[in-house]
Amino acid sequence: MALTNAYLVGSGKVKEFFNKIKDGQAPDQFTIQLIKDWGFSSSNDRAYLPLLKALGFLSPDGKPTSRYHAYRDHSQSKKVMADALREAYQDVFLIKENPTQADKEAISGKFKSYHNVTENVASLMTKTFLSLIDLADLKSDDRTKKPSAASIPDPVPDSTISHNNQAPVRPPPGLHYNTQIHLPATKDVEVYNAIFKSLREHLYDN
């Protein structure tokens, strides 16, 4: 389970901030100075740094990760954000698969109980989360889904099917005999009896 405690005091410029990530070149090291250079000069804006780490955009030492670089691709940025939110706010998604503003009270209660924080802090955490939701496409879930039992066809018995990556099992070769008997044209039943008796003794009784 996971539920980050990183939050913003003011989340009104979240979209603008993440647009800076998409439109700018990825730095070697993400710093407070870069946040200021982007025009976010308030001391409260420093909270973007731990938030980016919580989302997996930055490594613990502040270096952009592969997720940071993937987010810069406008065509997949919403999916990248969705993946990041599902990891950082995993416990929220246990409440609602696709949380919205209508779930604000339940989400805030989760933050309050999980982190043992005040109503005000829980509210700020909730506002931060919901502002990030607006940047994500939660329906773009490409995670592999297991097929249901109804969609799996019944196995077909076949002695030639391999098991455990072994070579296919095939029946051993054998010889088959086809015996033809030409009976003489006679009305004497004893002749036939003698023939069948001889066949039984030589073919079946051996």
Image (cartoon, rainbow, N blue to C red):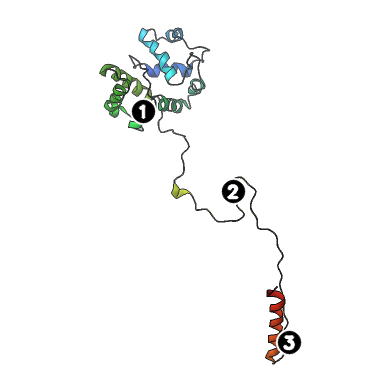
Where residue 91 sits, quadrant-wise, is top left
Q: Are marks 2 and 3 in contact (CB under 8 Å)?
A: no
Badge 2 vs badge 1, beta-carbon distance below 8 Å: no
The kind of residue tagged 3 is Pro
Mark 1 lies on residue? 91
- Say which residue label 2 marks: 163
The local secondary structure at tag 2 comes to loop
Residue 110 bears which disc, if any? none
Residue drawn at (46%, 10%) of the image: 31
**Which comes before the other along the chain, label 1 or label 3?**
1
User: Residue 48: x and y, percent?
Assistant: 40, 14
Q: Which mark identifies residue 184?
A: 3
Vertically, is 152 above or below 26? below
Q: Which image quarter is the N terminus in?
A: top left
Foreground tag (1 vs 3): 3
Callout 1: 10 Å neighbours few (<14), some, many (20+)? some
